[in-house]
Image: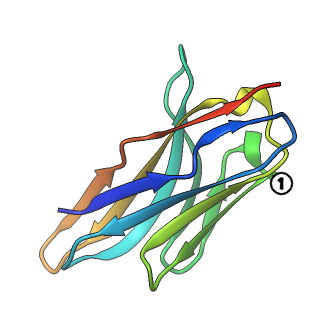
Amino acid sequence: QVHLAESGGGLVQPGGSLRLSCAASGSGFSISVMGWYRQAPGTQRELVASITDGGTTNYADSVKGRFTVSIDNAKNTMYLQMNSLKPEDTAIYYCHVNVWTPWDTANSWGQGTQVTVSS
């Protein structure tokens, strides 16, 4: 199995910054794409940002210009640098990965990390 370990969430004031990390562990796979999703109370889970192993990125309109997703291929770790945070960014952030194996594709979700933006 592919296991994801998330970290970096916490409480931050509006305008502040946080960096989330998501490390993929296991063996026998190659990352195709990793992404960050978030879900606030009463809302549907939405894609925040994604990045392919080759570095192609995609962002939700609500975070463009403020968030940056990156990946360290050697460490199989994805990061989400969140700047100029707003209260509406408050949510549980989930890491997701799609991987290739020699035989099939697979995917995995992280457990989620809470991000709270409040004064």
User: Few, some or many C-alpha atoms within 10 Å of disc 1 (few <14, some 14-19, many ≥20)?
Assistant: few
Q: Residue at x 30, y 69 (%)?
A: 25
In this picture, is 32 found above or below 34?
below
Looking at the picture, how far across and down is residue 73, in whole percent? 47, 82
Looking at the picture, how far across and down is residue 108, in whole percent? 29, 53
Q: Spot the residue most to the left.
A: 103
Residue at mark 1: 65
Q: Spot the residue most to the bottom.
A: 74
Q: Secondary structure at mark 1?
A: loop
In front: 11, or 20? Answer: 11
| Residue 9 position by quadrant | top right
Picture mark count: 1
Q: Residue at x 36, y 48 (%)?
A: 110
In front: 69, or 15? Answer: 15
Q: Disc 1 marks which amino acid?
A: Gly
Q: Where the C terminus falls, by quadrant?
A: top right
The type of colouring in the image is: rainbow
Looking at the picture, how far across and down is residue 61, in whole percent? 74, 43
In this picture, is 81 found above or below 60?
below
Looking at the picture, how far across and down is residue 11, in whole percent? 67, 35
In this picture, is 43 found above or below 92?
above
| Residue 80 position by quadrant | bottom right
| Residue 10 position by quadrant | top right
Q: Spot the residue most to the top.
A: 42
Q: Where the N terminus falls, by quadrant?
A: bottom left
- Using residue 26 as the reference point, say whether residue 85 is left or right of it: right
